[in-house]
Image (tube, helix red, strand yellow):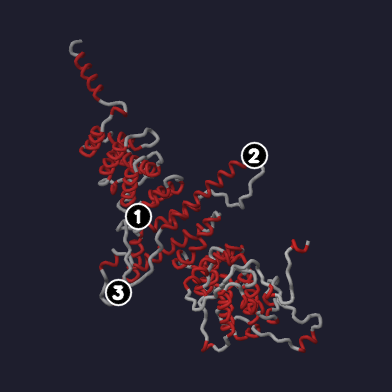
Amino acid sequence: MASTEPSSKKRKTKQSTKPNKRHDLSLSYVRNLGQQLLSNRSHINNLPVLLNFLNPSSSSSPPEFILESILSVQSFYTPLLNDLPPSSAKPTEDPESVYRVWLRAKFDDFVHFLIRLSVSPTLSEEALREVAVETLMECVKVGNAGKFHSSIYHKFIHTMVYSIEEADTLLDLLVSKYFKYTDICYFTYISIEKLIRTLDVNKSSGAKSENADSEKESLTKASGEVLIRNIHHVIFKIPPPQQLGEKTEFEMWNASGVFNKDSKIEAKKNKGTEGKHGKNKKSSNDVPSSTIISKKMKLKFSKAWMSFLTLPLPIDVYKEVLVTLHQAVIPYLSNPILLCDFLTKSYDIGGVISVMALSGLFILMTEHGLEYPNLYVKLYALLQPSIFIAKHRAKFFQLLDSCLKSPLLPAYLAASFAKKLSRLALTVPPSGDLVIIALIHNLLRRHPSINCLVHQEEKDQTAKDDTSVKPGIDLFNSEETDLVKTNAMRSSLWEIDTLCHHYCPPVSRFVLSLENDLTVRSKTTEVAVKDFSSGSYATIFRDEMKRRVKQVPLAFFKVIPTSLFSESDFGGWTFQPEEEKQ
């Protein structure tokens, strides 16, 4: 008995020195676990302990414990990643195989915990979140036997998009540090496309059911809109593919990336022709071709955007996409004509949506050969008084002027637009009148066949043939949507003559430019519509205040007048106060 008591006491002493509660742990203990794990394989059981500090669901570890555990586990796995089996591998009877499969499973747990830490709203320290993302991206870089681990990156993007609170923070981190690498942008496009294909969003019109589940439906729709907005933020922040040039350089996060395989295939195809000349570049098998990279980037960029445009976009996202589509998307698509369905449907909606879609549609028609016969009919329908106070009116009027620039337009079409604009001049603000005068000026100069609208004389034969038409009646039908039937060629621009007496001096001055003979193109020039397209009352007032007026009208009275009119103003009339009359 004497020999057993000391051993039991010794065992109790060892157990009492080992901390069992998390609040009793110290940073030195966690650091010691990591040092032991890195020093000897016999301390491999320290790995699950360190991973437990990273598990957000098990407990909330102090930030310093999480940081120390991340550094230790990352240092442990860095030299082993190239030798680890894939996640789907099953162990054999060999103990070493069982050990490596177990290590792979723990590595997958490590990656999973890093992703959860990066989107955890309870993580108070942003620096620690940044460390978690950097460690995760290092695992992405070499986690697939030294190659880019697209599966890990896809899980990270998927989790980030579904995160409500931390999506913007993580996206800003990716933009600042990682979106400059071409392969990361490449796999981001792939992840976005996969995510959209599996996205569970209600693609119906949004009409709520009359059942008791209406509240659940509205919550589902709200969450779907949040996901779509997050996807839009991600895809909009990715830099567009670089255009090929003389000094095109693609910076890669992983040097042995996905593009090298295609470059080797291309090199094998060209090997025979190069061998005939006795020259074969050694680096052609190692460095991917810029042409291959550019083509693949454009292809993935196009697939991601075309998939995104199939989603039921919220109205604010829809408008933002339409405004930026012609600059941020169309120039980088592999086949821009694929956007014709999206843009034509948007253009047919009417109102401000049509105005926003006009820019992209105009580029497809002028640069990519899109044929859209209803362009001018829809454009004519957009000419309403409300367009002159719309937010995007400046771009619309510039595009309207560009669409009416072709000399091949038929006379009836140019006349219909000129007459419709002339009629609108009676109801729009002064800034709108300035734009209308500029547009009509350009129309009359480009299309001499409609100059008859400036001074339309009655023809005796026409009057005899049509006895129902009374003299002085305007035959133009402003409500007609068919441009052939508007009777604009039988009308005149009498509304423009009224602008000569407009109360706003800039309008009455500017309309005098139409009195020149615009058919003499050598003596006249086109008016830049962009100089007037964004005008308002404020701009007109500011321009008038800057003008230097030589003669200023003054009113001077030696005696303060007691009435609005004097007796001399009305000869032969006498005015008596009401009191005297009584």
Say whether marks 3 and 1 touch (CB < 8 Å).
no
Question: Image height check: is 342 above or below 502?
Answer: above
Question: Image height check: is 401 above or below 2?
Answer: below
Q: Nearer the viewer, mark 2 or mark 1?
A: 1
Q: Residue 208: give x, y in percent of width and height.
A: 63, 46
SS at badge 3: helix
Q: Taking 97 as reference, is 151 left or right? A: right
Residue at image point 53% right, 59% down: 319
Quadrant of the rendered image containing residue 2: top left
> Badge 1 is on which residue?
176
Label 3 environment density (alpha carbons within 10 Å; few <14, some 14–19, many ≥20): some
Which residue extends farthest front? 580
- Answer whether residue 371 is visible to the viewer in this image: no
Q: Taking 162 as reference, is 282 left or right? A: left
> Badge 3 is on which residue?
274
Q: Residue 232: give x, y in percent of width and height.
A: 47, 55
Q: Residue 6: give x, y in percent of width and height.
A: 19, 15
Residue at image point 64% right, 71% down: 424
Q: How far apart are the two marked residues, 3 and 2, measured between alpha carbons?
A: 72 Å
Q: Amino acid at mark 2?
A: Ala
Q: Amino acid at mark 3?
A: Glu
SS at badge 2: loop
Quadrant, the N terminus: top left
Label 2 environment density (alpha carbons within 10 Å; few <14, some 14–19, many ≥20): few
Quadrant of the rendered image containing residue 12: top left
Q: Nearer the viewer, residue 552 or 428?
A: 552
Q: Residue 258: give x, y in percent of width and height.
A: 35, 59
- Looking at marks 3 and 2 on the same chain, the residue that comes earlier in the sequence is marked by 2
